[in-house]
Amino acid sequence: MDTQTKKALFRVCRLILGALFIFSGMTKCIDPMGGAIKVEDYFIAWGLDSAPWWLCMALSSVQNIVEFTAGFMLFCGVYVEVAAVVALAFMAFFTPLTLYIAIADPVSDCGCFGDALKITNWQTFGKNVFFLAVAILVFAWRHVDGKPSKSWKQMSMSLLGLIIASLVTLKGVTDEPIIDFRPYAVGTDIRASMSVPEGAPATEYKTTFILEKDGVLKEFDEATYPYDDTTWVFRDSRSEVISEGYVPPITDFTFTTAEGDVVTDQLLDSPTPVFLAISPKLESVGDDDMAKLGRQFELAQNNGFQFYVATASTGKAFEKARAKAGVALEFLSADETMLKTIARSNPGLVVLQNGIVVAKYNINHLPFDSEMATPAASYLAGIKHSYDWMVIVCLTMASVIVWLLLRPFKHKFSKTSSNINIS
């Protein structure tokens, strides 16, 4: 292979690998709490139930920031030698790990792309095998591109990638994700998301019946089952999925009272705002945060709104929570996984109106006082402010990137012009 072809192939592989790490890292930087939940799921699957939450959060955040920064460096072509080593280390670690996950199936989704893109465990492993090969090539040819960029440019671009990842992660830790890929995003009609569209394909199953006759076991399907022969004795049956049908985005949205009454329809049918404080584990909520919920509860009642604390904790934790909040909070029971999907902070706050998610708040940014009267409008105003800030930051960073990338060409053009004038 001649040098130019080798350089061209290396650059294509570098850009592809960099783009993968940028996309994968950013989707998880946006939602570091979701990544921490996934890390916790891994620990539980491996029998490490006592792993502290701060460790899960730290592992998630560091992995996301390093992954995005390495991808950013590869894509921009700065510190390629370092980024290639990091990328290869990532792929060398996660490829065998995803093979184990595909075989043992300890978790249904590896979380490689957060909630932005769901793929099966075997698809994840196949993807990793391909990109492991790309990472090996980039690592082996990391010096083929010749003299690296000037140190100030490499340092500036690398630092820029690190700052972007860190700021987005910090935003995700202290607030709800900037971009919500979950099925309970603001604007979601929950009833519509729970229903199956007319004409949608249904899941097809194959059922095998195991019958016995004269001491001999034999298998039958629905077509060959000996309905008229009563001498066959049923022993067992098994079902397997032939083809997956349509699965609604939301399948587990159910809330019950302490008495066991299902109140899901009551929550979804309310024309006035319903405030749901989401706390998968009441025992983990601090005194200050519970006091915030108590204040929020009183404000909601003053405005004539329903306010419930939805939790997977048992009744023993209710009285302790009421004592911390200083008010007679009302509790609903729900599935812990579903609650963690709805809101990332513990506790968080979700507002429903006519079955639509109209607002979501992290415990650090609850809608006190005047915002309570019009939660939907107040939330949208806050989102617009966040998006305006994000657009300004992105445009500033894009300008810096373009300036850094085009500056060498400007320098070369100036030298060429000078040579022409001299001659």
Image (tube, helix red, strand yellow):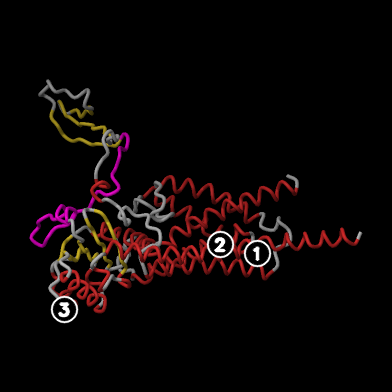
Going by the numbered disc 1, the residue's amino acid type is: Leu
Residue 282 versus residue 9 in the image, above or below: below
Tell which of 403 and 77 is nearer to you.
403
Q: Which residue is mark 3?
A: 326
Work out which quarter of the rendered image holds the C terminus and state it: bottom right
Give the CA separation, mark 3 to mark 2: 48 Å
For the point 70% across and 48% down, the residue is 6
Q: Which residue is mark 2?
A: 70
Residue 251 versus residue 375 in the image, above or below: above
Q: Position of residue 158 (x, y in %)?
A: 59, 67
Q: Residue furthest top?
A: 228
Q: Position of residue 209 (x, y in %)?
A: 20, 31
Q: Which range of residues does the magenta coloring cover?
A: 242-270
Query: Depth-wise, is mark 3 or mark 2 nearer the camera?
Result: 3
Check disc 2: other Cα within 10 Å, few if <14, some if 14-19, many if 20+.
many
Residue 184: in magenta span: no
Tell which of 222 and 381 is nearer to you.
381
Work out which quarter of the rendered image holds the N terminus and state it: top right
Q: Which residue is mark 1?
A: 404
Residue 246: in magenta span: yes
Going by the numbered disc 3, the residue's amino acid type is: Gly
Q: Position of residue 255 (x, y in %)?
A: 17, 57
Instruction: Identify the element where label 3 is drawn.
Output: loop
Q: Residue furthest left?
A: 259
Query: Depth-wise, is mark 1 or mark 2 nearer the camera?
Result: 1
